[in-house]
Amino acid sequence: MSAGGEAGGGGGEPRIDQAWYDSSTYFDGDTEHLLDLDSPFQRYRVGNVLAIASPAPDDRVVDLGCGWGTFEWVLGDRVKEIVGVDFSERSIELCNARLAEEPHAAVRFLQADAGDTGLEAGAYDLVICADLFEHLYPDDSARVAREAFRLLRPGGRFSVWTPHRGHILEVLKNNRIVLKPDPSHVDYKSMARLQGLLTDAGFEIERAYYAASHLPGLRIVERALQGVVPLLRRRIAVLGRKPER
């Protein structure tokens, strides 16, 4: 789910880095809803991410911060190639173990920094970055946006999906009111900041919008009022395109 890099957490807090993901229970805790592609959460997540940009059958795709390999299993039979990248050794071990049980010729996994993957430049049609930017420190975020730009062919697309810090649930979590904060969410981005990261890397913004949550009752309220009530803007979705020139 994450990328390596130089920036620290600040404030004396321990750095959430590769060692943290590999030594903690991040990939071994309550993950059933993440591993089950038919769970309500994953149906919501996958559907919304692919609504930002859905790849064509001949597309080559990179999934930065692949985590448990969700988009590899979803797209493995639908694209020419998809490479899942994560800097966590534990992540790639889990993904490769599942790949051995459920082979997909178009799927491969790579343990690497999402800001410096080593993959071929200008070779890919779509880069997916779903639920990664909230795990990245500021310097890492800029590096990941630049790496996505480097990987894409001219006209290629960069799809970003991340929580909106200003949503009521995130406000409650980050103030430890009823809910607990996620320690791996080290730096939430605003809509403006996220678009700035992409444009600074060279992208043109094709689409940018807020998406409602997966909770049925709350989703109805969010869709009706998120245009005027920032507390009801659950997710940020942005699609950048690498200029043809």
Image: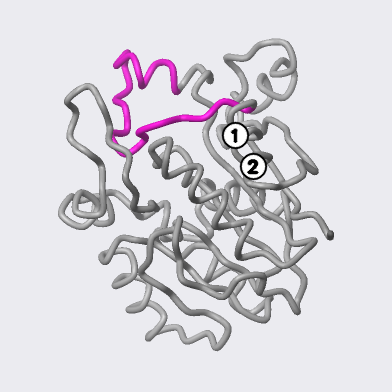
Specify whether 99 is left or right of 144. left
Q: Find residue 82 and report its horizontal and vertical position in percent.
A: 58, 74
Specify whether 122 is left or right of 224. left
Give the secondary structure at mark 1. Answer: helix
Q: What stretch is highlighted in magenta?
A: 170-191
Residue 75 falls in image quadrant: bottom right
- Circle on res. 194: 1
Contact, mark 1 vs mark 2 (Cβ under 8 Å): yes
Give the secondary structure at mark 2. Answer: helix
| Badge 2: residue crowd in 10 Å (few <14, some 14–19, many ≥20) | many
| Badge 1: residue crowd in 10 Å (few <14, some 14–19, many ≥20) | many
At x 68%, y 25%, the residue is 220
- Circle on res. 198: 2
Does 160 appear above or below 220?
below
Quadrant in which the C terminus appears: bottom right
Q: Find residue 241 and report its horizontal and vertical position in percent.
A: 75, 52
Residue 148 falls in image quadrant: bottom right
